Image: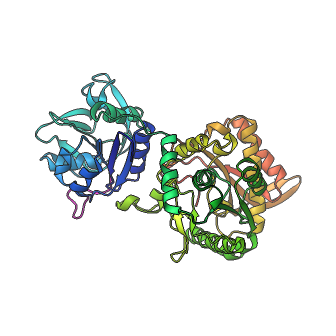
Amino acid sequence: MITASRILILDCGSQFTQLIARRVREARVYSEIHPPTRSVEWIKAWQPTGIILSGGPSSVTDEGAPTFDPAILDVAPVLGVCYGMQWLAHAAGGAVKGGGRREYGRAAITVGEASGLFAGFDAGEQSQVWMSHGDHVEAVPPGFVATASSSDNPVVAMRHASKPIHAVQFHAEVHHTVRGAEIIQNFLFGVCGCVPDWTPGHFIEEEVQKIRTMVGGKAVICGLSGGVDSSVAAALVHKAIGDQLTCIFVDTGLLRLHEREQVERTFRQHLGIKLVVVDASERFLTALAGEGDPEKKRKIIGHTFIDVFEDASAAAGEGAEFLVQGTLYPDVIESVSAKGGPSATIKTHHNVGGLKPDMKFRLIEPLRELFKDEVRNVGRELGLPEEMVGRHPFPGPGLAIRILGDVRREALDVLRKADAIYLEEIRAAGLYPDIWQAFAVFLPVRSVGVMGDGRTYEHVIALRAVTSTDGMTADWYAFPHDVLGRISNRIINEVRGVNRVVYDVSSKPPATIEWE
């Protein structure tokens, strides 16, 4: 890595660990996530400018709980977050207690000193943060001082009196911590002395070199979905190896309205990338027939994708050895434990855990360490049109995971029309850029309605729209009532078979953005 500064994040199992990396990179400082089992020798060789110890679900006194060699405290400045703070306190002889004061959600803290992590704050100032812990630091260890408190806890932040060691009980990386980004930047620049030199252009330069080294003169295929992730991944790989890349767009039968035509136009005309279009809709629908379990649907789609790629590659005579995927950080953290850490699995993503174990391709995942907003910026740097990079996320498994239960052609037709109306009205109202993701969901229920003078018993469509900065947390979008009413009216009147529309007002967490 050629950046001047680099932050090592040791993952203790928090679902928010990747958000720490995102906040660091937002500040244009490179970061990597690694398991807490990294040796001191390895860490020294990595040469971090600073070290962040993440949160996690364990108690510091649990058997098998994540732990660190205390010698890391002498390698570089350290910031402990949640569990990381508790470990620091416990290791230095402080009092960490479990239960009794569990805090989850928004909380107010009082800043004790306007320096260090809280430079730019006022002493005595109250600030909103996000808590998620059961254990707490009852008393600071010898050599430490408390720097913030809450009504429930006398110690929600602390620092060493003479060494660059800081800790917070709350999650500064979460969007709901109002000045969390400022706190992290204080650590990066005020404590660690980082240089902000990591940019989309820097990322592209490094990834291009990696891809060229990995691929050599071999052929590569990329499965296009038409979404932002696969499009940016394809453009990045194309920049690295040119015509060695063949993109394969699979019409799965699970696409949105006019998706196929848009992809063909963009990639052939705008980007000049070799594109093979495969109509495999019958193959996918047959494979999915009768299957309603969301995890099984994802795996069926993932396996079928690979089969189609293998067949298409053979038919094109390319002899491809590599497969490009637009896997992102949120995909990884929700599917598998990040970098060997103990983080819990939320759901399997088709492009992470749904691939066949005997797949013949080697994977190229150039976006695996990025969040969605970073991917969009990389796409802009690569010269992709805004209408492409600004699109709302669309899942690789397509509409199959927006149809709850069995995936039937009738349900797909209804959902496509409803979803198209929904997005059309959002754009017409000028709200599309304000929303992170919006989509319709086909529910496996029918409801009684009245149309004209007759009774109906027809399908229900759920609408979902959220705001987010990273996809890891999200709030439901508060539509103007007239817009929501107009959307509902159009769907019921124009989509045959629908007589009821509902709106999802769940946030993430506890819900996920997608329903499946």
What x and y, as percent, mark residue 169? 29, 42
Q: Residue at x 63, y 55 (%)?
A: 242
Q: Residue at x 58, y 51 (%)?
A: 236
Q: Quadrant of the C terminus?
A: bottom right
Left or right: where 205 falls relative to 13: right
Depth order, front residue of 235/414: 235
Q: Residue at x 67, y 45 (%)?
A: 388
Eyeballing the image, is 317 above or below 247?
below
- Tally the numbered discs: 0
Depth order, front residue of 345/220: 220
What x and y, as percent, mark residue 99? 25, 52
Magenta segment includes 57: yes
Q: What's the coloring here?
A: rainbow
Residue 499 visible to an observer of this rendering: no
Left or right: where 509 falls relative to 160: right
Magenta segment includes 71: no
Left or right: where 182 falls relative to 38: right
Outermost residue, top side = 122
Residue stretch rendered in magenta on the structure: 55-66
Outermost residue, right side = 453
Depth order, front residue of 421/199: 199
Magenta stretch, overall SS:
loop
